[in-house]
Image: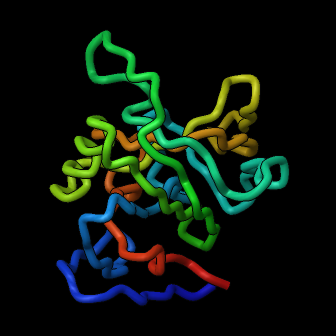
Amino acid sequence: LTMVLAALQVTERKCAHGLKVKAEGNGRVGGYLVAFGFPRDTHGEFFTGRTDFGMDYFDGPKRPVYYHHRQDGGEQVVREEIGYIYKLLQDDNGLYAEAQLDMNNPYARRAYNEVLLGEIGWSSGSAPHLVDGTEDGEITKWMLVEGSLTPDPAAGPRTTVYTVKFADVAPTQ
């Protein structure tokens, strides 16, 4: 897989994998939803290219996006979606995702501002009964059901989210 960059004139930033990304205030964001390999995440687990994300069970890439897995730091639960994933592509680094945020939603605006400040990352969501792993921490099955933008991603800076223009910064075949 090759990396393609076809973004236009706006602020330029560089992500953890060295890909430059251009920024614009359109509510579109992208980055690695899942990073493969090491170091392990904060739970002591890791994904690989062999992980089954259940991509064949869904009709396309569309998944909901939430803020901080439907939480807001304290006891408040944010139940509404703040956007949706429209692109999922796997390469040697991980599972890349792009999403459109609902800029009319206050939590989406908050998340987008945190993206602009470089303070937020992707975190993928599944359900306990849809997850399998090995004793050494490798996640072998992770039925991907949602993506969250969170200030505390388990994979740290490897899943930092960036703003993108027209969804043209992604791994492609």
Q: Quadrant of the C terminus?
A: bottom right
Question: How many numbered discs?
Answer: 0
Among all residues in the image, which is located at the extreme front? Answer: 104
Residue plotted at (28% across, 78% down): 22
Residue plotted at (64% across, 67% down): 90
Question: Whole-percent x and y of residue 128?
Answer: 68, 24
Whether residue 42 sits left or right of residue 151 in the image: it is: right
Question: Whole-percent x and y of residue 91?
Answer: 61, 73
Q: Depth check: 64 or 155 in front?
A: 64
Q: Depth check: 46 or 102 in front?
A: 102
- Using the image, determine if residue 31 lies above or below residue 146: below
Whether residue 15 sits left or right of residue 42 in the image: it is: left
In which quarter of the view is residue 42 placed?
Answer: top left
Among all residues in the image, which is located at the extreme top? Answer: 75
Q: How is the image coloured?
A: rainbow
Residue plotted at (21% across, 80% down): 12
Among all residues in the image, which is located at the extreme right? Answer: 56
Q: Depth check: 34 or 87 in front?
A: 87
Q: Depth check: 83 or 93 in front?
A: 83
Residue plotted at (46% across, 43% down): 123
- Using the image, determine if residue 129 lies above or below residue 32: above
In which quarter of the view is residue 105 placed?
Answer: top left
- Using the image, determine if residue 32 lies above or below residue 142: below
Question: Whole-percent x and y of residue 88?
Answer: 61, 62
Question: Whole-percent x and y of residue 58?
Answer: 79, 49
- Using the image, determine if residue 2 lies above or below residue 162: below
Whether residue 168 sits left or right of residue 111 in the image: it is: right
Q: Quadrant of the N terminus?
A: bottom right
